[in-house]
């Protein structure tokens, strides 16, 4: 009995062991694991490769990317091609008896005259004069009945349109006595002018054009404002000498006393600034912020020794030695401690007793009446001669009280010239009213505003274009959010400035252009935009290869092996057939 | 017959052409004359100089002496300190190895002390970096920088840039720790041009293989001079046995000899500067590059860049003021400060500061390093002792 069971047990065990053995006959236990193992290995390599490519590469790309906020590149491109139109609203008022016979339409009517000022091949500015012709109202007639042109101008001032940039021309009859003999145009202190009628409409229009160009802008003044776009050689180096448009200016008055042993010079600069300079700066406050300071320098000598002239028994500084005068003094002026705005220096030089009196000679050898000279974009120097004391035994030092009115007349004239407001090229039959203590007429302020607005718009568009080119070219620079917002603001302000100009609102256009300049300068000169690390491509490879190569080699090799195996397997079935 | 007609027409055409040429010939000299006169004069109104010495340490004494000598010449010819940006390591004059403290000599036998007592160094010692140099050039300076450290040039400025130190093919070494490449320099100049920060620029470099630094310039109105070509070394001039180091480099030495003859009114032009230091004296071959410059170097005065000659005009106008104007109240009256003067103790609340409780520090999760360190420690522990010990830890 026991032997039968043992035999059955042994057979059962053998059958069981057969069942639990998964290997096919003849293959052997080692080879049976290989395809599964190989499949697992293949799957592992593929999953490594997929994770590396799908997860790793985008993650690396995203984390090594520099943050670049979006910029309006399209708008910036459009800025440089945008045509600028300068619109001057004008009213031409005919007094009774001055209406020319050949008017195309009866009064009142409107007319538009456009002119193109081409600066270079791509840029051109169009000027558009929108003229309203009408006849005088009763109040204006009463005002024009005044005795002199100045009184008429003062009486007409409250009746005019006084927005910045607008002009009013009054045409008076040919026989009127308002304008003196030989004068055909009188330009007032504000924004109006009196013209004498005469000739037909064509002559009147020609005269109107001359006056409006004088009172608003000329082709040369616009070209000078856009001077960096004008091709070299066209304007000449002398044209680009006015002060550049800036948000503020610093004015420094300095008194140079090289000989304190002989002269004790007292100048009431504070009083002079309050009485004479402040009204002018208040008028110019629309254009920029001004700050004024003053100093006295002792033992400051001119760099040039003046020549003694026997005939006039005075010392002379000739015109060609003047350029060398400024440099030795400039080191002592302390303009490096002043603000970041452009500094205008006005120097008053009291010559030494041994070199008194000192006169400046112009190119023809005649002494200059103002005894002063100025340098563009720098400032001016005036020589103040002190009379020799009556008796040679007078005790030294001699006390000198400077006549500040005489000095300020010259300094303020130099300030006007530095800004480009000169009254030299006026035709002889024009009479310009002197602006008095205000320093400049309203139309001269307009002149400045036109030039500065056009200059600001041009500056902003070049700044933004070059910034966009720079950021486009160098992909490594980080563009922060506040830089981007400044750029957006600058673009919006410039577009609004151009729109306001085309509508004829000069003040709004000027303020928009100022804001545009501030924003664009802040964006361009932001300290974070410094591209310091120049990464040539070979340096990039040198950085990334030691990091990625050790990881990539096994993956690539296993991928290559998988590809080879699949290709072999695909070939095998055909072979075995 | 057929041949005569084309012959006649050809003769007529030739006559017409000749006439045209004559007319053009008559008109041209007039136009050329105007152009020549305009190109003669440079349109600049002010001058700036950026002088950079890029080395430090005692054995680079000659680079500091080079830069200071150029500084002296430029000041002598009229450019004021406010228009000079001087970048020096400035560790020579007070160096413990200097046998004559507070001096830097440029001639042997201690003839000429170029340090003097009115030298104004704007960027000294470790402030002379590539970043600061590029910031000065491009103007991207932090707002707190003082005015003396800024290059406030405008579109009417002529700028002189002088660099000296150790250089190689395409780079210049700054303070033995970093370098500036010629591509970066060319890009910086292009950014200056885009913002119109210069009218004309003269770039002088006195290093080994200096010509490689100006190879990549592409902005207009730049003239460049270098002391040696690519593959050549610039050599130093003379050692002083008392001081123990070389005092100057050859190229700058001869340039300075040349500049000693220049005074503010001289009419010497750039072609003479190109001839300075021939190979026999300098051993290296100085090079120059003028293709980007619009004017002919013959017409460019040395004082256009090294000196500061201003254009002046006689003031012919005078404003007429009314003298009897009383003192005007300014339109914007300053507010009177009606507060009483503050005493110091009231401004500084000492009591509050002393009795302040320490602020509770916010809890931050442990950073990566700590986490990594702990992960390493735990991994090693479990490797060694096995996972079954985890219950002892947690």
Image: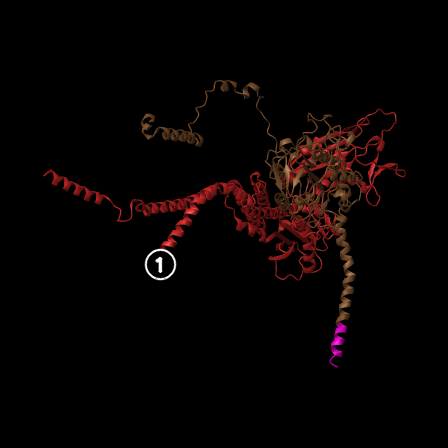
Which residue in the rendered view is the most extreme toward the front?
A3
Is A109 magenta? The answer is no
* Residue A267 falls in image quadrant: top right
Q: Which quadrant of the figure contains the N terminus of chain B?
A: bottom right
Q: Nearer the viewer, residue A358 or A189?
A: A358
User: What is the x, y in percent for residue B295?
Assistant: 73, 50
Q: Which residues are magenta?
A: B1-12
Q: Nearer the viewer, residue A329 or A381?
A: A329
The chain drawn in red is: A
| Image height of A577 relative to B43, above or below | below
* Residue A413 falls in image quadrant: top right
User: What is the x, y in percent for residue B24?
Assistant: 76, 63
**Residue B318, visible in the rendered structure:** no
Q: Chain of mark 1?
A: A
| Image height of A576 relative to B284, above or below | below
Residue found at x 45% / y 20%: B357
The chain drawn in brown is: B
Q: Which residue in the structure is indicated by mark 1?
A: A575
Q: Nearer the viewer, residue B106 or A231?
A: B106
User: What is the x, y in percent for residue A143?
Assistant: 66, 48
* Residue B391 falls in image quadrant: top left
Q: Nearer the viewer, residue B247 or B359?
A: B247
Q: Is residue A51 left or right of residue B332?
A: left
């Amino acid at each position: 009995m026991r032997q039968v069971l043992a035999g059955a047990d042994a057979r059962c065990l053998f059958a069981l062991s057969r069942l639990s053995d998964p290997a096919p006959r003849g293959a052997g236990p080692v080879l049976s694991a290989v395809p599964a193992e190989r499949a697992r290995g293949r799957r592992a390599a593929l999953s490594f490769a997929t994770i590396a490519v799908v997860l790793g590469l985008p993650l690396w790309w995203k984390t090594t990317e520099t943050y670049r906020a979006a910029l309006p590149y399209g708008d910036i491109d459009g800025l440089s091609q945008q045509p600028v139109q300068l619109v001057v609203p004008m009213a031409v008022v005919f007094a009774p008896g001055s209406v020319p016979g050949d008017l195309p339409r009866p009064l009142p009517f409107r007319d538009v005259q456009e002119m193109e000022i081409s600066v270079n091949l791509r840029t051109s500015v169009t000027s558009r004069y929108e003229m309203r012709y009408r006849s005088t109202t009763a109040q204006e007639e009463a005002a024009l009945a005044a005795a002199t042109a100045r009184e008429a101008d003062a009486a007409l001032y409250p009746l005019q349109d006084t927005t910045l940039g607008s002009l009013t021309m009054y045409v008076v009859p040919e026989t009127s006595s308002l304008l003196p003999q030989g004068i055909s145009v009188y330009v007032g202190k504000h924004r109006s002018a009196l013209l004498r009628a005469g000739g037909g409409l064509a002559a009147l229009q020609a005269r109107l054009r001359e006056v409006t160009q004088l009172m608003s802008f000329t082709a040369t003044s616009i070209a000078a404002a856009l001077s960096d776009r004008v091709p070299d050689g066209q304007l000449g180096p002398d044209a680009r000498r006015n002060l550049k448009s800036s948000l503020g200016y610093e004015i420094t008055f300095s008194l140079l006393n090289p000989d304190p042993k002989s002269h004790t010079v007292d100048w009431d600069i504070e009083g002079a600034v309050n009485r004479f300079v402040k009204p002018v700066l208040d008028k110019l406050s629309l254009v920029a912020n001004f700050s004024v300071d003053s100093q006295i320098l002792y033992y400051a000598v001119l760099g040039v020794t003046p020549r003694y002239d026997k005939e006039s028994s005075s010392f002379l500084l000739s015109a060609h030695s003047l350029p060398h005068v400024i440099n030795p003094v400039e080191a002592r002026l302390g303009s490096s401690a002043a603000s970041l705005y452009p500094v205008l220096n006005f120097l008053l030089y009291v010559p030494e007793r041994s070199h008194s009196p000192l006169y400046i000679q112009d190119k023809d050898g005649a002494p200059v009446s103002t005894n002063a000279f100025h340098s563009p974009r720098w400032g001016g120097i005036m020589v103040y001669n002190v009379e020799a004391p009556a008796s040679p035994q007078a005790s030294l030092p001699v006390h000198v009280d400077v006549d500040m009115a005489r000095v300020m007349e010259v300094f303020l004239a130099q300030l006007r010239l530095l800004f480009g407001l000169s009254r030299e090229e006026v035709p002889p039959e024009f009479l310009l009213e002197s602006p008095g203590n205000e320093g400049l007429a309203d139309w001269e302020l307009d002149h400045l505003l036109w030039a500065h607005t056009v200059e600001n718009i041009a500056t902003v568009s070049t700044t933004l274009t070059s910034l966009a080119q720079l950021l486009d070219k160098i992909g490594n620079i980080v563009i922060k959010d506040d830089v981007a917002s400044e750029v957006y603001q600058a673009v919006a302000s410039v577009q609004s400035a151009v729109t306001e100009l085309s509508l004829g609102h000069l003040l709004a256009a000027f303020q928009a252009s100022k804001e545009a300049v501030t924003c664009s300068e802040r964006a361009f000169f932001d300290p974070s935009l410094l591209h310091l690390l120049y990464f040539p491509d070979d340096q990039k490879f040198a950085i990334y290869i030691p990091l990625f190569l050790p990881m990539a080699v096994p993956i690539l090799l296993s991928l290559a092996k998988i590809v080879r195996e699949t290709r072999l397997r695909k070939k095998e079935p055909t072979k075995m057939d | 017959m057929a041949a005569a007609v084309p012959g006649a027409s050809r003769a007529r055409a030739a006559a017409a052409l000749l006439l045209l040429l004559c007319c053009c010939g008559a008109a041209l000299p007039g136009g050329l004359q105007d152009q020549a006169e305009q190109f003669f004069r440079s349109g600049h109104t002010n001058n700036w100089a950026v002088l950079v010495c890029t080395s430090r340490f005692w054995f680079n004494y000659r680079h500091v002496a080079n830069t200071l000598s150029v500084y002296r010449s430029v000041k002598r010819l009229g450019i004021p300190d406010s228009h000079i940006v001087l970048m020096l390591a400035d560790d020579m004059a007070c160096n413990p190895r200097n046998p004559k403290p507070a001096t830097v000599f440029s001639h042997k036998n201690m003839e000429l002390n170029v340090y003097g007592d009115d030298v104004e160094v704007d960027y000294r010692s470790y402030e002379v970096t590539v970043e600061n140099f590029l910031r000065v050039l491009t103007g991207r300076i932090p707002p707190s920088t003082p005015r003396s450290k800024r290059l406030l040039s405008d579109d009417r400025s002529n700028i002189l840039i002088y660099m000296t130190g150790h250089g190689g093919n395409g780079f210049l070494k700054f303070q033995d720790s970093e370098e500036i490449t010629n591509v970066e320099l060319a890009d910086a100049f292009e950014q200056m041009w885009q913002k119109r920060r210069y009218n004309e620029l003269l770039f002088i470099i006195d290093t080994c293989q200096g010509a490689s630094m100006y190879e990549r310039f592409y902005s207009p109105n730049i003239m460049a001079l270098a002391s040696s070509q690519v593959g050549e070394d610039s050599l130093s001039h003379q050692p002083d046995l008392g001081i123990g180091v070389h005092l100057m480099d050859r190229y700058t030495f001869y340039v300075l000899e040349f500049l000693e003859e220049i005074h503010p009114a001289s009419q010497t032009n750039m072609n003479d500067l190109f001839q300075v230091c021939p190979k026999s004296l300098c051993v290296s071959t100085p090079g120059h590059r003028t293709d980007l410059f619009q004017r002919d170097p013959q017409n460019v005065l040395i004082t256009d860049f090294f000196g500061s000659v201003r254009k002046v005009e006689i003031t012919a106008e005078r404003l007429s003021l009314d003298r009897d104007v009383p003192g005007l109240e300014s339109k914007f009256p300053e507010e009177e400060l009606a507060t009483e003067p503050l005493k110091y103790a009231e401004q500084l609340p000492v009591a509050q500061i002393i009795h302040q409780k320490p602020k509770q520090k916010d809890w931050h999760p442990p950073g990566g390093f700590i986490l990594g360190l702990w992960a390493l420690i735990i991994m090693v522990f479990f490797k060694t002792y096995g996972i079954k010990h985890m219950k002892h830890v947690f």
